[in-house]
Amino acid sequence: MMEVIADLHIHSRYAMACSGRITLQGMEATALGKGINLISTGDFTHPEWLSEIKKTLEPCGDAGLFKIRGSESKLRFVLGSEVSTIFTGKDNTSKKIHNCVLMPSIESVEALNAELSRFGSLSSDGRPALSMSAAELVEKVFNADRNAFVFPAHAWTPYFGVFGSFSGFDSMKDAYQDQEKHIRALETGLSSDPIMNWRVSALDKYALISNSDMHSLEKMGREANVLEIKENEMTYDSIIKAITEKDAHGFKQTIEFYPEEGKYHYDGHRQCNFSVNPDTNKLTKCPVCGKRLVIGVLHRVNDLADRPVGYRPKGAVPYVHMVPLREVIAYVLKKTTYSPVVTAMYDGLVSALGSEFNILGTADLDRITELSNDMVSTAIHNIREDKINITPGYDGVFGKLNLIESGSKLTETVKKQKSILEFK
């Protein structure tokens, strides 16, 4: 059996608010340094990016996967994109849902793009905003290729998540109508993790997947999926099967951002620097300015939950929390994640100890100390043991980490899971 670490929601430099440094070659180099061996191309709806995909990648036989032309690496790409659907719901209010699409061939992508271009511009944004319902999108996707894979992106985030506070949907059926039958997974997003989603019994039928929603190369793999595939049988079909077919036992775990660090975990109002825990206070208006608070992910999970905190469904896929290595180093050195000194220490650790996931998961702490300092190894130890504190994020503000000083568990409801590379 072989291990596949997959990040299936990625953006190119053609998507709004994304780094201009993103290239397919850069994505390959970054993925290999992280320990990832399967990534989405992202943004296949954008004509210029699709042109680059066709020039730079080549098919891996008939596997439905791709690789850099002439590359000897084992990294594989899957054709993927995110689409924003904007439509009027039954209650006559505007609905906006972000959806991720994976497809097995360039021909299928081109057929889909030709159809989607009727609903809006594909060249204005790598994540196009189209005037069509989520159900219409799914129908068009499966008309283009019956082997396509569609899942709601960052399902709980307020503005564009299927369950977000501004979507108005309380069920997948309401959101996707008669096309819900094609939805087999949902992306939990940075501000929630599996244990939160397990509280909603209606989600048991869907695979809970986690991806980075990368807008810069450094953010790749901040969330990912760990799969197990038969040796030399890594194909598009085997990947989808591992994710969606529980009896196949190929979905081993997800790698998770701490949801408290996500920028929509709590309710709050960014302009007034105000946030509130919905577990203890049911405020809906900002006490500073009187305007409506942005209702966050924890609040929405509580709204839909029919199970207690800590409930674990039978057969649920395990998970492990992590903090990206650059963030750990930046925290310790009190620098930005992109500063040269952070990059130098990051590159030194990866060069000496292997991939980022190996460093965060199983690398010897004494060796990490030798190559960095005591505080970096202490922070990594605390993350491995879920012994960190986070001031939760809200209304677009990321949570603030405390990786060193706390020494107490983040929450009693978080059960320690296997380390990133210990699931075998």
Image (cartoon, grey):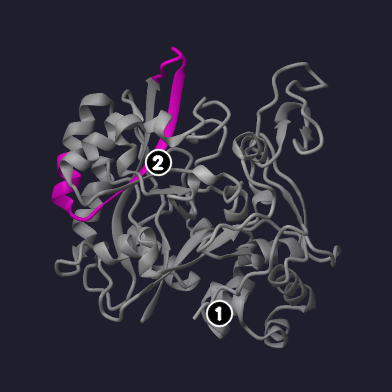
Q: x, y percentage for residue 299?
A: 67, 36
Q: Which amino acid is tagged 2?
A: Ala
Point 21% across, 38% down: residue = 113
**Above or below, 256 relative to 352:** above
Q: Nearer the viewer, residue 349 or 231?
A: 231
Frontmost residue, 224 versus 110: 224
Is there any visible trace of residue 383 in the rendered image? yes
Which mark is first along the chain, 2 or 1? Answer: 2
User: Measuring 73% from the left and 77% from the top, which residue is drawn there?
Assistant: 377
Q: Is residue 253 above or below residue 283?
A: below
Q: Residues within 10 Å of mark 1 (few under 14, many from 20)?
A: few
- Residue 262 locus on image (x, y percent): 64, 47
Q: Give the residue pinned by disc 2.
A: 15
Residue 422 bears which disc, if any?
1
In the image, which disc is placed on residue 56? none
Residue depicted at 24% across the width and 35% down the height:
139
The range drawn in magenta is: 88-111
Numbered-mark total: 2
